[in-house]
Amino acid sequence: MIKHWSETVDLNGRPFFIRHWGDENLPKLLMLHGFPEYGGAWAQLAPLLAHKFHCIAPDQRGYGQSWAPSEVAEYAASKLVNDMATLIGNAPVYVLGHDWGAAVAYGLAMFRPDLVSKLIIMNGVHPVPFQRALTAGGAQAEASQYIHYLRREGSEDRLAKDGFAKLLTLFSANMDHAWSDADTMAEYVREWDRPGRMRGMVNWYRASPLVVPKSGEVINDLPDLPPEKLQVRCPHLLIWGTDDTALLPIATEGLEGFAADLTRVDIAGADHWLHHQQPEAVARAILDWL
């Protein structure tokens, strides 16, 4: 029987809800969810890793049962990274990130390398290859047009209307959602419906400096980001669901220039929600790499 429990902890004076799987004496694996999920999104994958790791899955800022300030400025990348750096403490851990969780995971690896022993990313993107893919104005820019919708004021209210109908549609758009049965989606809706959470979740998009061109637009005048400051110096595994329609392979082109010790593993037949669709294959990729 795998040990599983949850708790609320204080991080920099704010409450954060944390789920745990596995023996606390095992190596720690920090699991960072994306939009529009929460720490419970790891319920299929974590038990498959808990014989090797103490899996730690927080509801990140703005999500679930964790602190959810209403101000956009409270979702600056530096603050999101600092939350997780505080949770980690002083000893380095393994870090796994998906979607927006990948942005925080990359931030930890780049700016707090002392806290990350190995980095695992699942269908998430390093900021430089992703920004390059967006500003080129091609397929990735078209696939990311929904970001404009999310950034508009009041989008949280439109997403929540009629029992979160718009968010449910966005969540499953062009993706295989056979994994999300009625009970699972009821759990998601419960988390989304907590006061202030929809605004907190959307504020991640509003606070991001990411530049998304309008449909058909190409942007050529963005300043170059300094590659020497954005390096992942630890071993890095990128697991990719090949049927993802939100993040395309072009969004990872050139990643080797920022991660010298990079291993890529594709999961055929899976899309953006690969940890729900094929958790066994994802777990196997992680354990084989390690």
Image (cartoon, grey):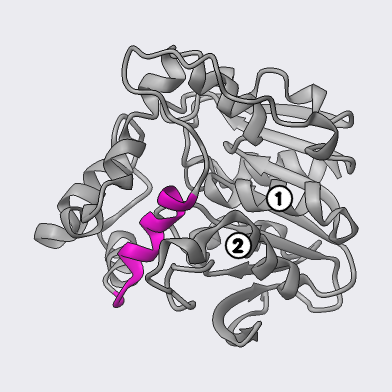
- Residue 47 lies, in percent from the top left, at 63, 63
The label shown at residue 80 is 2
Question: Which residue appears at 16% of the width and 53% of the height?
Answer: 158
Above or below, comparing residue 100 to residue 257 in the picture: below
Residue type, numbered disc 1: Gly
Please say whether residue 267 is visible from this viewpoint: no
Residue range highlighted in magenta: 194-207
Choose the circle earlier in sequence order: 1 or 2.
2
Please say whether residue 124 is visible from this viewpoint: yes
Relative placement, left or right, of 78 versus 271 is right
Question: Which residue appears at 43% of the width and 74% of the height?
Answer: 68
Observer-nearest of 165 and 157: 157
Above or below, comparing residue 255 to residue 2 in the picture: above
**Residue position for label 1:** 107
- Residue 207 lies, in percent from the top left, at 47, 52
Observer-nearest of 127 and 105: 127
Residue contact at pointers 1 and 2, CB within 8 angstroms = yes
